[in-house]
Amino acid sequence: MEMEEEEDEPRLKYQRFGAGSSIPGILKSDSSSCLCVSPKILALGTHAGQVHLLDLNGNEVKRFHAHGATVNELCFDNRGEYVGSCSDDGTVVVTGLYTDEQSKYDYGRPIKTVALDPDYAVKKSRQFVSGGMAGNLVLNSKGWLGSRDHVLHSGEGTIHAVKWCGSLIAWANDAGVKMYDCTENQRITYIGRPKGSPRPDLFKAHLHWATDTLLLIGWADCVKVARVSTRSLAVSAGAGGDTSHLVATPGGIGEPSAAVRFVEIVASFQTDYYISGLAPLGESLVLLAYQSTPTSPDDAQPGHPGAPGKSAKAARKPELRVVTWANEELGTDILTMHGFEHYRANDYLLAFAHPALVAPIRAANTAAGEEGVSFKGGQWVEAEELLYYVVSPKDVVVGRPRDGRDRVLWLMQRDRYEEALATAEARQTTDPQLYEEVGRTYLEHSLATGKFARAVELCPRLLKDAAAWERWVFHFAQVQQLPALAPHIPTSSPRLRDKVYEVVLNAFLPNPQDHKQLLELVRGWPTQLYSVPAVIAAVQRRLATARTGATGVDLHELVRGW
């Protein structure tokens, strides 16, 4: 007989922004096109050109009509004081969240992506970088004579995505992904798209800086993780390697050689689904997966004209998958989004927020004297809260990593009480109520399913005070299992009320087979625990109604013993 496959526990828990937030009202007459998250506020862009500023509970704080067409992307500076937006109307708008400041720049062609200088709020240069259908990656800076544009790169098709972290700008165009070092004013790498990839305009490119030096790339059905490192130019040349792709950083006084930045691909894999977003989770990756229902075997092949994303087929529900850097699946959650049947891969996006980690990671990098630290050092795991926002045109769902309490409740729902109790016991000091809840439910389940021996074993482990023992004595009485529990009932520390001990002794009288155990119990229990006259009266009533020899032992002996 085939064994039933064990159900995988979800990695995240989810909550939809519902009637208690402003989002349902906003999306009733409009559709979301992008979302950006800062430590204090959310920015939601729509196809009508609106930008809505929301608190972390989804309540609208402010809105402004920034554009005349779809808002393609939003971004905050590190301080969360400015938000940048770009649109198909060809404009970039930078708006102050706490002032009336707003600047608008018209580029004449649809702008698909924008990124503010992380230090935009504190630098006089007020830089941002943007790109779109014109194929130019443009850096805008403010100077004495006003703002001016500087083209960092052009000639390789549409600029699909750009992300700025520290001194590094990463962007994706039709050819692939590139990086630019603002400190050295040079490009430092080129990461090509895999052969056989779908047309770059069919699926959005997704870039995410996991740390100052670790870039996550997801495009169509391909994932890559790129790390920026630094080494001595002399070491690179001495090893006989090609140093033409490296950017030299001048050494200090007395240093024999310059340092160089280089990029290495530390992980790369292909998926059997299309990627609508990606983000880090501990030492793993979270991927927003899109699939459609194939209408023919050919349709199921990536890159085929009928591949996922085409409107000819019904779409499946999106999935949030947790995978390792080697694409080993750790968990999959299927998400029910309103109207999912009609959406394509580009209709979804995944926004990620972990404000508490930005400062610690940078501080660690500075203390170590390095450009970056290993992502696999567990920085993300120690955080109190990570947030993953899954966005569709008519819906926003927020996911959080599950904690020990969530695991306990999940195990209980599947009647895996022993595992649930062990997990709750480990958390007993921080969540004693959960431990009590699991213990109570486990006992109730054991009694209800006839597992009386297991219930008896649990009582000394779970019941710590007189009130708890007295409550469960009466529960055992209701299922006529007090004779089994009696040997485990405490007679001191805690001591129960006299009436409880009397109820236990009376439970032995109806069944002659229990009379021997009753005699042993009476001999072992101090008479101060119960009212001897009350128990004698109960025994005499039993003797008066019992047939001769039916009691199994001589209850007269018990009475004489008192």
Image (cartoon, rainbow, N blue to C red):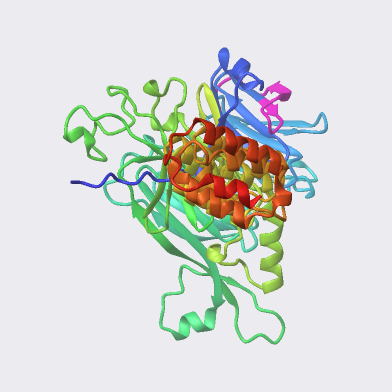
Residue 223 picture location, percent across and down: 40, 51
Q: Position of residue 453 (x, y in %)?
A: 45, 48
- Answer yes or no: is residue 528 visible: yes
Q: Residue at x 66, y 40 (%)?
A: 500
Q: How many numbered marks does the figure carry?
A: 0
Residue 162 magenta-highlighted: no
The answer to if 67 sits in the magenta stretch is yes
Q: Residue furthest right?
A: 99
Residue 511 vs residue 424: left or right? Answer: left
Q: In the picture, residue 108 is in which quadrant? A: top right
Q: Position of residue 281 (x, y in %)?
A: 53, 51
Q: Kindly tell me whether residue 209 is visible in this rendering.
A: no
Q: Residue at the top extreme? A: 29
Question: In front: 256, or 77?
Answer: 77
At 37% from the left and 59% from the top, the residue drawn is 326
551 left or right of 221 in image:
right
Q: Name the spot of residue 95 as percent of width and height, x first.
A: 73, 32
Q: Residue at x 66, y 85 (%)?
A: 255
Q: Specify the segment rendered in magenta.
A: 52-72
Of residues 327 and 433, the one nearer the viewer is 433
Does residue 344 sit above or below 410 in this rendering?
above
Report the front residue among 424 and 126: 424
> Is 392 left, or right, of 471 in this rendering?
left
